[in-house]
């Protein structure tokens, strides 16, 4: 028996309507742990990493994977690992209770191939697996789907027709008030949990996301679209098997120490990433109107997105993932005079939503005003409240429809800027007045995108493809100058023209345009990235990992698995394997395009980085607090000095970033991806 892992992954072939069990050896778990690393391993093992298997091909592998501590430690997550519709590696993480339920059912993951002939969902109760009809929830959105399916899947102990207690067993006061009724049982308990797609996933919108608990998204790179391409509406789990821990006492001792540290972090526990709003103002890292600016001159403008303001104006209830003290998911309610928004129940937006759906779409400005970020804030507390309502509504519709609001936020803001600059008109977008701050227009457009209705079909492939569409429509290639994407995916609420990110980190992360995998440069960036990739393979929350520290991560891994020789060198080696495997996937899968080269891929950065310094807020008034490039990125230095030096430090080809044969041998993965890397070296040089 293994510990930390069950040693089995459920494989479902939707075309053949069959199920089987994949049983990796313990050495595979020790080399890859789970999550992102294991997903990349299987893509090579199954031969789906190359250009001949596009994302929507039935042969494409879709994984949901966990790690050795999922379900028992604080901050357990799940990793959706597949190939993005945008032709790069997809590895997106989400929290909630569903990852634990899969682990408790006795599985380390699920691997899905093929395509169902009609809409289905997969129901798993421990070893019992069924492919069920999903026609009754097809066409519905995420929250409704979860409520329906979670009630349909039950474990062996989830129902009791008769009373469990006799009157004599009950405390006297309770028995007097509620005498036991032998004919009254507890009925069905709703304990199952699901990963689902909304209408965006059904319609294969390229940035669609698998969702759970209404607001927890595997948000990046389009895993929900791959689910939709397989006619898979949901995967619903109920587990009663527990967790195979090696040293339970040691494991719980480490968990208690971690939770004690978490409990002392007042700001994080209460406000999550909303604690960062003041720092974003001070470092020009808040997206405003498609990243035309990075700060407001008047800090009062951003009070609306501060944690305390949100708590007082909209919070209803806080909740957490299993065993976690952070309680990062907070239910919020909209109270607005706008009937389209009023009564909306959403989660409190995290920092990314605050940025890409807040200031980025112009929701900060009060209705009826057209001030610039250089002006004093012209509104009052009620204007702030309504700005927050718009943000909550925008967050809700993206979550419920199942869309990555980072890429789609940049998508919408691009269209708004093109409208602002008179490069397109409302007639080009079905007559919708998609201008800064118009929540009604945003609401209408997002639904059009999710259903591929009219202009929504042109915008459904993300910000980069939207820019290409309008550039071709208008015969104006300059439109691409306003596209805020890197590697063709939308930029998060962290900028390289302020004090929170380096351009090098965005160019080199193997999850394109991801903000959570390093922010420094040089060797420090490599260490940050490898630590993040390890977290994605252990499948733990990055915010919790910061509380754990290196020693706790190693100790928890040892206690879960019984690998007593596990240390930080092995932890970081998992991250380095991810970096190499996924770099090769990102390049290899695109080699079918005759115009593709590694230089083309690495050159896909937002033009605004290199040419448009900010004019508002504190940043232009001082000097760079972190990066030597200053107010804009030095393109020549980035590509001719920093990037080649980074590849060399990684042990990859300095010229094109392809991992060398020696590096793959050192990492022990040459048998997995060596032939693909050799093919690319032959084609593009060393």
Image (cartoon, grey):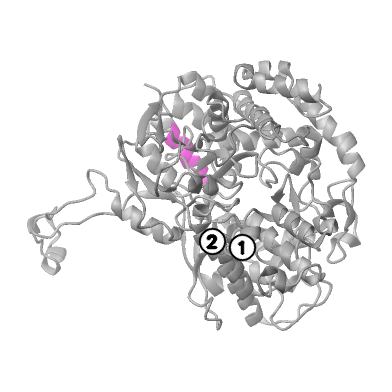
Eyeballing the image, is 123 above or below 174?
A: above
Cβ atoms at labels 1 and 2 below 8 Å apart = yes
Q: Mark 2: few, some, or many residues within 10 Å (few <14, many ≥20)?
A: many
Q: Which residue is mark 2?
A: 451
Tell me where the magenta segment starts and ends, as one range. 251-260
Residue 436 visible in the snapshot: no
Is 431 positioned to the left or the right of 28 in the image?
A: right
- Which of these two is toward me, 594 or 378? 594
Look at the numbered disc 1 and give the secondary structure of its residue: helix
Eyeballing the image, is 325 above or below 124?
A: below
Quarter-of-image position of residue 448: bottom right
Q: Mark 1: few, some, or many residues within 10 Å (few <14, many ≥20)?
A: many
Residue 506's spot in the image, x, y percent?
Answer: 74, 44
Marking on residue 200: none
Please give the name of the residue rendered at 87% of the width and 38% of the height, measured from the top-left corner.
639
Q: Which residue is mark 1?
A: 456
Look at the numbered disc 2 and give the secondary structure of its residue: helix
Between disc 1 and disc 2, whose residue precedes? Answer: 2
Residue 644's spot in the image, x, y percent?
Answer: 84, 31
Quarter-of-image position of residue 171: bottom left
- Which of these two is toward me, 556 or 77? 77
């Amino acid at each position: 028996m293994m510990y930390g892992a069950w040693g089995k992954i459920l494989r479902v072939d939707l075309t053949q309507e069959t199920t089987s069990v994949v049983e990796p050896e313990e050495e595979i778990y020790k080399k890859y742990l789970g999550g992102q690393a294991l997903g990349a391993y299987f893509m090579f093992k199954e031969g789906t990493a190359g250009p001949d298997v596009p994302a929507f091909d039935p042969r494409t592998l879709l994984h949901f994977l966990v790690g050795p501590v999922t379900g028992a430690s604080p901050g357990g997550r799940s990793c959706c690992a597949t190939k993005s519709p945008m032709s790069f590696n997809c590895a997106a993480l989400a929290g909630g209770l569903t990852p634990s339920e899969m682990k408790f059912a006795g599985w380390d993951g699920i691997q899905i191939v093929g395509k169902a002939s009609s809409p289905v969902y997969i129901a798993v109760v421990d070893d019992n697996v069924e492919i069920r009809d999903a026609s009754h929830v097809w066409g519905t959105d995420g929250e409704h789907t979860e409520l329906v399916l979670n009630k349909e899947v039950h474990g062996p102990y989830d129902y009791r027709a008769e009373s469990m207690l006799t009157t004599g067993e009950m405390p006297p006061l309770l028995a007097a008030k509620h005498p036991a009724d032998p004919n009254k049982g507890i009925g069905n308990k709703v304990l199952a949990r699901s990963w689902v797609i909304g209408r965006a996933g059904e319609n294969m919108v390229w940035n669609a996301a698998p969702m759970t608990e209404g607001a927890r998204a595997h948000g990046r790179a389009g895993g929900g679209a791959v689910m939709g391409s397989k006619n898979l509406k949901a995967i619903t789990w109920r587990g009663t098997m527990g967790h195979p821990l090696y040293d339970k006492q040691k494991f719980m001792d480490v968990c208690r120490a971690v939770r004690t540290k978490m409990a002392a972090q007042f700001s994080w526990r209460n406000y999550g990433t909303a604690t960062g709003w003041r720092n974003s103002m001070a470092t020009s890292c808040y997206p405003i109107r498609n990243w035309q600016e990075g700060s407001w001159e008047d800090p009062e403008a951003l009070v609306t997105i501060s944690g305390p303001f949100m708590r007082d104006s909209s919070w209803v209830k806080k909740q957490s993932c299993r065993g976690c003290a952070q309680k990062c998911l907070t239910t919020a309610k909209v109270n607005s005079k706008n009937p389209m928004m009023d009564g909306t129940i959403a989660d409190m937006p995290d920092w990314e939503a605050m940025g890409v759906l807040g200031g980025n779409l112009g929701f900060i400005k009060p209705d009826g005003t057209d001030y610039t970020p250089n002006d004093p804030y012209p509104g009052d507390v009620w204007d702030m409240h309504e700005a927050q309502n718009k943000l909550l509504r925008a967050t809700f519709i993206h979550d419920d429809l199942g869309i990555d609001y980072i890429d789609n936020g940049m998508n919408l803001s691009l269209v708004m800027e093109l409208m602002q600059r008179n490069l397109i008109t409302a007639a080009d977008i079905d007559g919708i007045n998609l201008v800064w701050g118009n929540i009604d227009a945003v609401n209408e457009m997002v639904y059009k995108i999710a259903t591929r209705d009219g202009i929504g079909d042109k915008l459904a492939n993300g910000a980069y493809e939207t820019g290409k569409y309008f550039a071709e429509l208008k015969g104006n290639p300059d439109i691409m100058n306003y596209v805020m994407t890197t590697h063709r995916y939308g930029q998060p609420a962290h900028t390289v023209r302020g004090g929170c990110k380096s351009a090098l980190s965005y160019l080199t992360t193997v999850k394109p345009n991801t903000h959570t995998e390093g922010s420094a440069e040089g060797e420090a960036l490599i260490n940050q990235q490898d630590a993040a990739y390890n977290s994605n393979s252990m499948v733990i929350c990055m915010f919790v990992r910061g509380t754990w520290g290196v020693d706790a991560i190693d100790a928890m891994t040892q206690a879960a698995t019984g690998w007593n020789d596990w240390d930080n060198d092995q932890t970081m080696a998992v991250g380095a394997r991810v970096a190499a495997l996924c770099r090769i996937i990102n390049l290899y899968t695109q080699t079918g395009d005759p115009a593709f080269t590694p230089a083309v891929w690495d050159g896909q950065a937002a033009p605004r980085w290199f040419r448009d310094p900010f004019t508002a807020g504190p940043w232009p008034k001082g000097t760079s607090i972190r990066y030597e490039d200053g107010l804009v990125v030095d393109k020549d230095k980035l590509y001719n000095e920093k990037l080649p030096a980074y590849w060399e430090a990684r042990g990859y080809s300095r010229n094109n970033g392809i991992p060398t044969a020696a590096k793959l041998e050192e990492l022990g993965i040459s048998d997995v991806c060596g032939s693909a890397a050799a093919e690319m070296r032959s084609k593009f040089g060393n």
